[in-house]
Image: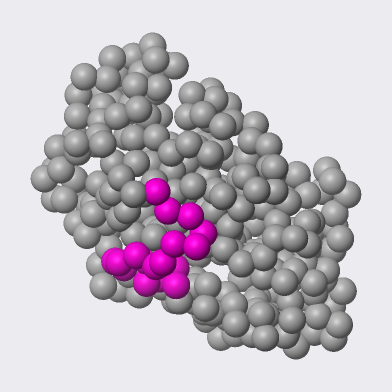
């Protein structure tokens, strides 16, 4: 397949590109700067522009681009950037795909388990309703922005990704140095559920969504058994052979992170029922295996 990817230089994209090429796919990377190599195509989500000539012959698109949720404090301006980077980017890609003749066969649209909001101890699946909060609203708008592709008859799979376990980015890039120093510990009560997935399982799942025509609609990309923050803490301490007696109180997180702290302290017990039904095989079904794979 000739596959276009946005966000190719990000945590997931940088691992996905070589994996796709290893499977024999031709990868076209969409970039927002001037192109430098033949495998790049220019796009600009803020203006809705995609180089139509470079998009010809694309069989599928994996759309991962978006401003990092935890990269900065949530000011009103940055919250607007988080939303716009996802909604405008997805609308741009979906519209470009719909305009092609023939149109590409599949859009794997990056999404997030933030759709479900804080679920506490309640388990949620792909059929569960939208939750409450800023991220839940963002994800709903993000997925809705793919409507031009859906209306054009393109198969659309929404990859609702959990916390990706990797030392190259995301939460674990920040956690690992702290735990290696013996300064790690539970966050808040530690009873909040963290629905995680290892980077290699994330890449395998995205390729499955691309290649297998049975996948469409929302698909939770998480390991089969969510764990609590306290269980993550114990696993980190055990695998790194470091103490985990310290903890971060809730009030300190609220001061340091502002509104974003509500999502760090929140609980999401998300089950990947679509992947399980398709007999997807996880390389890292447990948190211990996921951490070990990145160590």
Magenta residues, as a range? 123-140
Q: Please state the horizontal and vertical placement of residue 206, each as a whole percent of the image.
A: 67, 52
Question: Which residue is pictured at 65% across the width and 77% down the height?
Answer: 93
Front-most of residues 291 and 72: 291
Q: Quadrant of residue 138?
A: bottom left
For residue 94, what is the image quadrant?
Answer: bottom right
As for residue 44 lying within the magenta part, the answer is no
Tell me which colouring the rendered structure shows: one colour
In the picture, measured across the screen, residue 72 lies left or right of residue 249, that is: right
Which residue occupies 28% across, 15% down?
243
Along the viewing direction, whichever of 25 and 163 lies nearer the viewer: 163
Is residue 191 in view?
yes
Q: Is residue 132 on the magenta stretch?
A: yes
Estimate the x, y position of residue 214 in percent, counting from the top left: 75, 60
Q: Residue furthest left?
A: 251
- 162 in relation to 242, above or below: below
As drawn, is 222 to the left or to the right of 77? right
Task: Tell me how many marks there are.
Answer: 0
Residue at 68% x, 37% y is 281
Looking at the rendering, in which quadrant would you find the N terminus? bottom right
Q: Is residue 169 visible?
A: no
Residue 140 is situated, as x and y percent measured from the top left of the image, at 44, 72
The correct choice, above or below, for 177 with respect to 269 in the image is: above
Closest to the observer, 286 or 199:
286
Left or right of residue 271, residue 2 in this image: right
């Amino acid at each position: 397949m000739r596959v276009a990817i946005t966000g190719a230089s990000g945590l997931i994209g940088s691992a996905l590109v070589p994996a796709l090429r290893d499977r024999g796919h031709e990868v076209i990377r969409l970039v927002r700067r001037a192109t430098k190599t033949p495998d790049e195509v220019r796009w600009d989500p803020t203006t809705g522009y995609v180089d139509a000539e470079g998009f010809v012959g694309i069989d599928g698109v994996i759309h991962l681009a978006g401003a990092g949720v935890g990269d900065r404090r949530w000011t009103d301006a940055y919250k607007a950037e988080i939303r716009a980077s996802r909604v405008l980017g997805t609308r741009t890609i979906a519209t470009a795909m719909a305009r092609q003749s023939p149109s590409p066969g599949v859009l794997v649209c990056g999404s997030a388990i933030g759709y479900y909001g804080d679920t506490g101890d309640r388990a949620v699946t792909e059929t569960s309703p939208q939750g409450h909060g800023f991220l839940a609203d963002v994800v709903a708008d993000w997925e809705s922005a793919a409507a031009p592709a859906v209306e054009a008859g393109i198969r659309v799979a929404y990859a609702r990704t959990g916390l990706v376990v990797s030392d190259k980015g995301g939460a674990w890039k920040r956690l690992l140095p702290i735990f290696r120093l013996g300064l790690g510990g539970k966050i808040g009560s530690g009873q909040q559920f963290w629905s995680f997935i290892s980077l290699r399982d994330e890449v395998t799942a995205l390729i499955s969504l691309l290649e297998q025509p049975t996948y469409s609609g929302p698909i939770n990309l998480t390991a089969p058994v969510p764990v609590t923050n306290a269980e993550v803490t114990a696993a980190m301490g055990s695998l790194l052979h470091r103490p985990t007696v310290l903890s971060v109180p809730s009030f300190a997180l609220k001061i340091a992170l502002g509104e974003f702290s509500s999502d760090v302290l929140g609980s999401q017990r998300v089950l990947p029922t679509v992947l399980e039904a398709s007999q997807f095989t996880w390389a890292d079904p447990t948190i211990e295996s996921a951490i070990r794979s990145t160590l």
